[in-house]
Structure formats: structure tokens, C-alpha cells
Image (cartoon, rainbow, N blue to C red):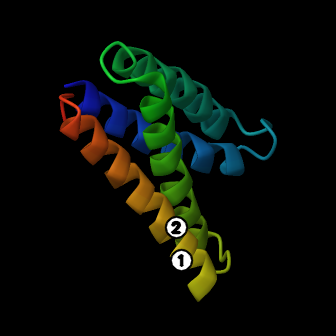
Amino acid sequence: MPWVVLVIAGFVEIVYMAALEKSDTFTRLWPTVIFVVGVVTSMAGVAYAIRSIPLGTTYAVWVGIGAVGTSIYGMLFLREPAGLARLGCIFLILIGVVGLNLLHNASGGEAA
């Protein structure tokens, strides 16, 4: 269950980062509300996950999901560049997140 909560927290990070961009420096009410609720929700998920998953792994997986998802969001909806090198770097982040999960599982931890 901690891995499921961690993955959800990572996806919530994507949502609150998108809301941050839409908030226009906290001048628009609803995107700002979504941002604040998202931050609190995501942090609560991370706090729950670190009870069972090592801190470094928890943080790397959470940030990895957020970074990859936010980058993809930017490319799809904000017209950010999507060159081969950038996509390759995103792929490397994904490999790192999967690797951390596999290594945690190999050491006797619970996998996602």
C-alpha cells in the first residue's frame, strides 16, 4: 500500500504543478486552491510512504514521477520543446524510478 500511495502522491504533484502554472503567480483563485490542496495531499502521501519505504527511495520516486509527468504535461499542453535529447533524459529518469523500485524489492522490501 505505501507504494500505491507514493505513486498517487507523485501524480498529485503533476496536478499541483499544472495548477501553479495556471494560477498566474497566485492571482487566480481556483488554480491557487488546487495548488494548495495538491501540495498538502501530495506531502501527506509522501509522509505515509516514508513509514515503510526508505526516505531516499521515497523522495526519488516521488520527484521522478512529478518531474516526468510535469515535463510531459509541458510538452503536450504548454508547447515546451520535446526534442530527442529531452525525451531521452525523461526516459533515464523513468529507468531510475523503476530501478529503485526493483532494488527495494530485491532487498526484501515491498514492491509497487
Label 1 amino acid? Leu
Asked if the residues shown at circle 2 and circle 1 are in contact, with their CB atoms under 8 angstroms apart, the answer is yes
Residue at 47%, 23% in the rendered image:
55
The correct choice, above or below, for 3 with respect to 85 in the image is: above
Residue at 49%, 49% in the rendered image:
64
Q: Along the line of sight, which residue is nearer the eye, 99 or 68?
A: 99
Check disc 1 and report the residue beneath it: 87
* Label 2 residue SS: helix
Q: Is residue 70 visible?
A: yes
Image coords of residue 66 (percent x, y):
51, 47
Please state the total of marks drawn on the protein image. Answer: 2
Label 2 amino acid? Ile
Horizontal arrangement in the rendering, residue 4 relative to residue 41 (left or right)? left
Residue at 80%, 37% in the rendered image:
27
Horizontal arrangement in the rendering, residue 98 relative to residue 87 (left or right)? left
What is the residue that sits farthest to the top in this orientation? Answer: 51
Image coords of residue 77 (percent x, y):
57, 70
| Quarter of image, res 75 | bottom right
Q: Along the line of sight, which residue is nearer the eye, 103 or 29?
A: 103
What is the residue that sits farthest to the bottom in this orientation? Answer: 84
* Label 1 residue SS: helix
Check disc 2 and report the residue beneath it: 90
